[in-house]
Amino acid sequence: MSELTTRLAVLARHRLFWPAAVLVALLAANVAYRPSFLSIELRDDHLYGSVIDIVRLSAPLILVALGMTLVIATGGIDLSVGSVVAISGAVACLWISELDDQNSVGGVLVALGLALALALVLGAWNGFLVAGLGIQPIIATLILMVAGRGLSQLITQGQIITINSAPYKLIGAGYWLTLPFSILIVAVVAALAVLITRRTALGLIVEAVGGNAEASRLAGIRSRRFTFMVYVVCGLCAGIAGFMMTSNVSSADGNNAGLWVELDAILAVVIGGTSLSGGRFSIGGTILGALVIQTLTTTVYAMNITPQTSLLFKAIVVIAVCLIQAPAFRAAVTRWRRTPTPAAAPAPAATEVRA
């Protein structure tokens, strides 16, 4: 019994334990409300089910959060990813809408290339401001967060651009090998991220830069170059996420596309156990955090709770997960549980009175 308790205590100290426990609790709540929640069926060679929908809808957030993870690992932050999402989607949809044949694969690939190139430029702009000019990341990316939303409105002329392109719709709403194509894209990007950051020295260098940029520079690491690079990667991930969001609805809305996705990405990174002060990161934890956020949103909708209150539930879950993960909070709870109850004072001995 004591060995089992010890193993559970060791498991509970793992950084991914509590986010996974919250995800399981949310899924259990959905199963209790609707027993068929976990059922998956094959129709027309496509997998359907609530779990498949959760993973498919969380795909853009996972992509944005992966880029955000690397940025936060260097001690920075990127508030402009939502604007980059809107810009990349607007450019792609604008180019496709002007094609004579919107189903032309070549035309769609050119649109994707132009939008990705612009996303890389925007990421490089953030990297230049942070690594080149030394501007605080929150200020540097706040500039593009504000200006980028106006740029996306300028690209779409304040209108919602609708398209009817089967190749483009495949990115966010299509299926391939029975699975949603967006899930396959995320799987490839996540695998590349894990391979590059955990099978090479790049992940260790990023953590070293986030832990102490000056010390890493003195150790021979070109910290500014790596800081610049992670912002470019973050812009690239946000650009691909923009394709998914706009292709899922076959339209580009420069005002609402990617709205508040930067906050969800930061929450996913925090839930996954990545330190906001930099120095350590977890790709798996970020993916788990994004799934927790999307599962919570799906739970709110499935239980017919007013959608406007989803932000409140999201805040409650995030606070709970962060408190559980905080060593100071866990230590305080442990001390409270171990505090012995003061023993009752012994009753005074009866004194015999003799006459």
Image (tube, rainbow, N blue to C red):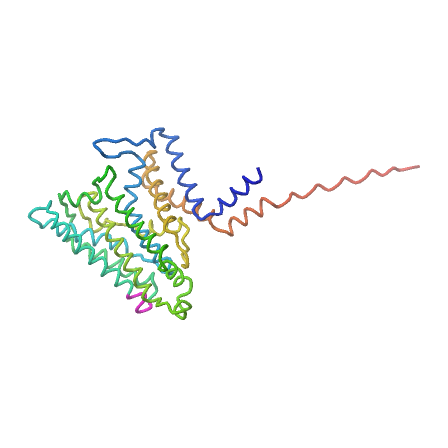
Q: Is residue 167 left or right of residue 343?
A: left
Residue 152 location in percent, x, y? 20, 55
Residue 260 in sight here: no
| Residue 353 seen in the current view | yes
Choose between 176 and 201: the one closer to the eye.
201
Report x, y in % for residue 128: 28, 66
186 to 305, vertically: above or below: below
Instruction: Note whether 31 is above or below 267 in the view shown.
Output: above
Quarter of the image that includes the C terminus? top right
Query: What percent of the width, then of the height, locates residue 106?
Result: 11, 50
The magenta span reads: 128-134
Instruction: Give the x, y percent position of residue 50.
Output: 30, 35
Q: Magenta: predominant secondary structure element?
A: helix
Q: Residue furthest bottom?
A: 218
Kindly identify the residue that appears in the image at 21 percent across and 49 percent down. Answer: 243
Q: Residue furthest front?
A: 199
Place residue 217 in its image quadrant. bottom left
At a point 30% along the width and 68% down the height, the residue shown is: 132
Q: Quadrant of the N terminus?
A: top right
Task: Give the residue at x 85% y 39%.
Answer: 351
Q: Residue 215 or 299: which is nearer the viewer?
A: 215
Does the magenta run of residues contain 112?
no
Q: Nearer the viewer, residue 45 or 16?
A: 45
